[in-house]
Amino acid sequence: MLRIVWVLWPSFLVAGVAEGIFFTVIDPQELYFFGEAVHLSKIATYSIGFFGFWAVCAASSFMTCFLQRSAAEVNKGVGAAPSSEDGCRK
């Protein structure tokens, strides 16, 4: 549960900042998606944009948590490595 908080809370904050910067520069009524104008209300465009930014930021935070795992966490459940004594038994 703690890792979920580590992923979602910072990504929520960064998504809010990213949306603020993005929609300060770009008007939602002038967006085009695959060559077609977006015919959504400004609130719907802001909401979709926020959740899109949040998903990208959460993926980045998740990847950081995934890559900082120790070797013991990665190999947990794989099975114990044979010791050098096991191979020398007669």
Image (tube, helix red, strand yellow):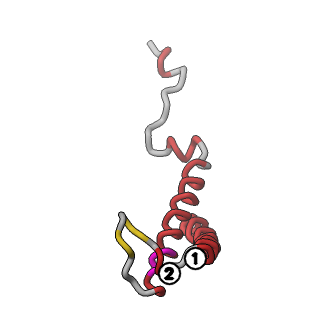
Residue nearest the observer in this picture, 35 or 6: 35
- The residue drawn where x is 50% and y is 14% is 88
Which three-letter amino acid code belongs to the residue tagged 1? Phe
Q: Please give left or right for residue 15 compared with residue 86 in the image.
A: right
Residue 30, position as x, y percentages in the image: 47, 76
Task: List the residue tagged with mark 2.
Answer: 46
- The residue drawn where x is 39% and y is 83% is 40
- The residue drawn where x is 39% and y is 76% is 38
Image quarter of the C terminus: top left
Task: List the residue tagged with mark 1.
Answer: 23
- In the structure shown, which secondary structural element does the residue marked by tag 2 occupy? helix
Residue nearest the observer in this picture, 72 or 40: 40
Task: Point out which mark residue 65 bears.
Answer: none
Q: Quadrant of residue 4?
A: bottom right
Q: Main secondary structure of the magenta part?
A: helix
Q: Please give left or right for residue 42 compared with residue 37 in the image.
A: right
Look at the picture and state if 25 lies above or below 80.
below
- In the structure shown, which secondary structural element does the residue marked by tag 1 occupy? helix
Mark 2 touching mark 1, by CB under 8 A? yes
Q: Please give left or right for residue 11 compared with residue 78 in the image.
A: right
Q: Is residue 48 magenta?
A: yes
Q: Quadrant of residue 77?
A: top left
- The residue drawn where x is 49% and y is 45% is 76
Q: Is residue 26 magenta?
A: no
Residue numbers of the magenta segment: 45-49
- Counting residues from the start of the chain, the first of labels 2 and 1 encountered is 1
The answer for how far apart the CA atoms under marks 2 and 1 are is 8 Å
Assess disc 2: are there few (<14), some (14-19) or many (≥20) residues with their C-alpha within 10 Å of its C-alpha.
Answer: some
Assess disc 1: are there few (<14), some (14-19) or many (≥20) residues with their C-alpha within 10 Å of its C-alpha.
Answer: few
The answer, for residue 9, to whether it is visible in the render is no
The answer, for residue 89, to whether it is visible in the render is yes
Which three-letter amino acid code belongs to the residue tagged 2? Tyr
